[in-house]
Amino acid sequence: MGWMAERLNWRGDPAALWPEARSVIMLAEAYTPDQDPMEIVGRPDRGAISVYARNRDYHDIVKKRLKTVGRWLIEQAPGAQIKVFVDTAPVMEKPLGQAAGLGWQGKHTNLLGRELGSWFFLGAIFTTLELEPDKAEISHCGTCTSCLDACPTNAFPAPYQIDARRCISYLTIEHHGPVDPALRPLLGNRIYGCDDCLAACPWNKFAVAAREIRYAAREELLEPHLSDLARLDDAGFRALFSGSPIKRIGRNRFVRNVLYAIGNSGDLAFLETVLSLRSDPDPAVSNAAEWAAIRLQSAKGTDGA
């Protein structure tokens, strides 16, 4: 995670990213799921994909919307300049979102709002225009610790603090190579991201519905069977996840995650598939396959078979 430290000066001051900027406009777009996102976690033969990644890549959709708003802004104020950002630059979206009144950073460190709930993307428009600031939002978490209590890996050492090295979203998306064996059983069947802390937030009962159909889950990604995913080669992976944010982690890291989920399933029906991947050319995949095989065989011995 050195890239965060390397860009710390940019994150601490938006002006360091673009010195000409005088204002930042923050926008939120809901991707609220239309069904319980935790239901899939109780199905160990299926893969749990984070709600935001079950269809089109939000980076592309949100950036186009930001550019549309930006063009309108320039039309209203000729000579104004803008830059738009969606997770692709060292922008402190969450503190800026709170300063703009969209919501507040909850104890799980994510932004949430009384009308938005937990399920929304953030985008930023930097502009050379001097705009009157909105009133910042304050926290409405109170004594609630639902999000902290829901974390499978205890990634929150304290409220408002997160240890990314234990966060399932980090481990399944950003982390290269094998995952710490002590954490693998805690991943369950989560193969890309994790929604547990978001789903646990009581404010979601007020969450606005998603309007963008491209955020609705594709049928094949709603409850995919782990055996189908484990058999993906590079071409198959690219075809299945074309236009998806999942595509960027590549086949090897994804199949590694799938094998951890298979190892946690306790289902011996997966054993043949797992054994075939022990000789995979990618070291993280072959390591995960070996681990999964041992887990499955141990489960077989426990059952007395």
Image (tube, grey):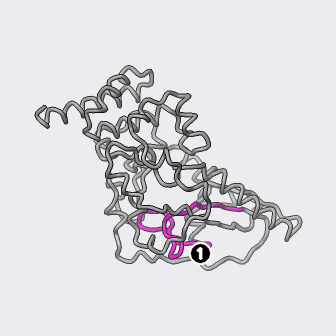
Residue underneath mark 1: 101
* Residue drawn where x is 33% and y is 37% of the image: 262
Q: Where is residue 116 in the image (x, y as percent from the top left)?
A: 53, 71
Q: Residue furthest left?
A: 304
Few, some or many residues within 10 Å of mark 1 (<14, 14–19, 20+): some
Q: Give the range drawn in magenta.
A: 100-125
Q: Can you give x and y, in whole percent of width and height, for residue 11 in the image?
A: 60, 56
Q: Tell me what residue is drawn at x 31 percent, y 45 percent.
A: 44
**Where does the image place residue 183, in percent across and percent down from the top left?**
31, 43
Which three-letter amino acid code belongs to the residue tagged 1? Gly
Q: Main secondary structure of the magenta part?
A: loop
- How many tags in the picture? 1
Observer-nearest of 216 and 124 = 216
- Residue 259, placed above or below residue 25: above
The residue sitting at 31% across, 32% down in the picture is 270
Quarter location, residue 149: bottom left
The quadrant holding residue 20 is bottom right
Q: Residue furthest bottom?
A: 135
